[in-house]
Amino acid sequence: MATFVDRVVLHAAGGDGGNGCASIRREKFKPLAGPDGGTGGDGGSVILVVDPQVTTLLEFHHSPHRRADRGGMGMGDYRQGATGEDLILRVPDGTVVKSPEGEVLADLVGDGAQYVIAQGGRGGLGNWAIASAKRKAPGFALLGEPGDLADVVLELKTIADVALVGYPSAGKSSLIAAISAARPKIADYPFTTLVPNLGVVQAGSTRYTVADVPGLIPGASEGKGLGLEFLRHIERCAVLVHVLDCATLEPDRDPISDLEVIEAELAAYAGDLDVDGTRIPLNERPRIVVLNKIDVPEARELAEMVRPDLEARGLQVLEISTASHEGLRPLTFALAEHVEKARAAAAEPSKQRVIIRPKAVDDRGFTVTRKQEGEREYFQIRGAKPERWVRQTDFTNDEAVGYLADRLALIGIEEALFKAGAIAGAEVVIGDGPRAVVFDWEPTLMTGSELLTGPRGTDLRLDDSSRKTRNQKREHYKDRMDAKADARAELWTEREAGIWTDDDPSTS
């Protein structure tokens, strides 16, 4: 059973907004006193919040699907639906939020940092809010918007000042256990450390954290061993400590070659070092070389032999023994000095600026694009307003559909469709994906732009002769009088001819 999880895929869904209410107020002596339907409540959002008490993403490993509460339905007597409660998900400090494609969405560092991953839907307006001077008693209400759906990847990158790197069984876990209160598992076989370990070290007045990650091997940056899975935990460290095993029994290994292999793997690893634009590559950060296990005589001799070569490369070298604690105190103070320099050089976090993006003068709020897919030709409308209005429309109510048509025509969509080349019966798509609405366009006569298809300088509306002139009315009246005279003459002729004579003698 997993006890430490540092990468999960989270499926979040914001709460749906509540539907508006279509209701008519009833009072004494006034059975129809006007609309009083209330607005639906907004849905809750899914929010990530940093909590220092949380150290792993294990909770989301077992329950990756999360949904916020939906908003309540609107009710009569102007009562608004209840607002859905936000779903607060607490994550460890140092959690990075990514899209499934790997794009960094947020880097949550610091107690209380938060990020909204799925916004709740808006509540639908009731018929009281829709009523106007022209539409005094709407028989419909708007539907609530569905909440956002989002799939994100959460990656935990440990917040530590110092990182211990090296081959398996080099003594990293023993070192962190000797200089801090951490008690990691220690054994005499490779890859004993399966998860990162954190320890807090006090050196004089300086307190800092040390991270011990699983051992690295050649090819770790390409996915071999466990190194790639946990190299992300040293991305935030200010100082790297190379722990070199001077008492290894493997014939093809020595401290110099081990250092070169680890340096090559750190240089090959990129990660998300540019997430905030201030981090430098791992192989360019301050480094200290620790020659471990000098309590073994042969190891001490080897350490004294390779030390000049390492110092010639400009590296600070310290000889220690985690078994006898020799050299640990100078190491802790040397690390404290590097940590203090890194903290002093770190830029102070700038306050979040309020960015105002005014709407452009020529921004209509939507776009109309003519598209061709094989033999299918259609016009796609994209924009926040029209897409939201479509989601809020009850297409089973003809009055609601008419209200949607009026709103779309009011912002100029029909004019834009006409300019894009759409004609009556053309296929129009509002939105994109499974929530898109497809219909055949039937232009209204509100603007008359669909009639302006004649030559320039002409207007077919001027040729409309539906209203009769005085002469036409006079001719129509004469035709009616002549038709009546002809009908009377025909009846008189039939009567004179005896067509209406009754031949029954009993009636005479």
Image (tube, rainbow, N blue to C red):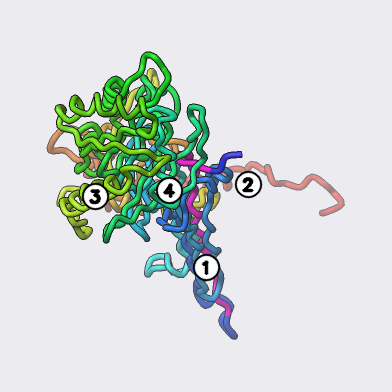
Distance from disc 4 to disc 2, alpha carbons, whole Å, reads: 69 Å
Q: What kind of element bears circle 3?
A: helix
What secondary structure characterizes most of the magenta part?
Answer: loop
User: Is 93 contained in the magenta span?
Assistant: no
Choose the circle earlier in sequence order: 3 or 1.
1
Along the line of sight, which residue is nearer the eye, 373 or 279?
279
Q: What kind of element bears circle 2?
A: helix
Picture disc at residue 390:
4
Q: Position of residue 370 (x, y in %)?
A: 30, 30
Distance from disc 2 to disc 3, alpha carbons, whole Å, reads: 126 Å
**Three-letter amino acid code at disc 2?**
Arg
Residue at the (38%, 18%) spot, across then down: 374
Q: Position of residue 207 (x, y in %)?
A: 31, 56
In the displayed structure, 168 sits above or below 48; it is: above
**Three-letter amino acid code at disc 3?**
Val
Choose the circle earlier in sequence order: 3 or 4.
3
Distance from disc 3 to disc 4, alpha carbons, whole Å, reads: 56 Å
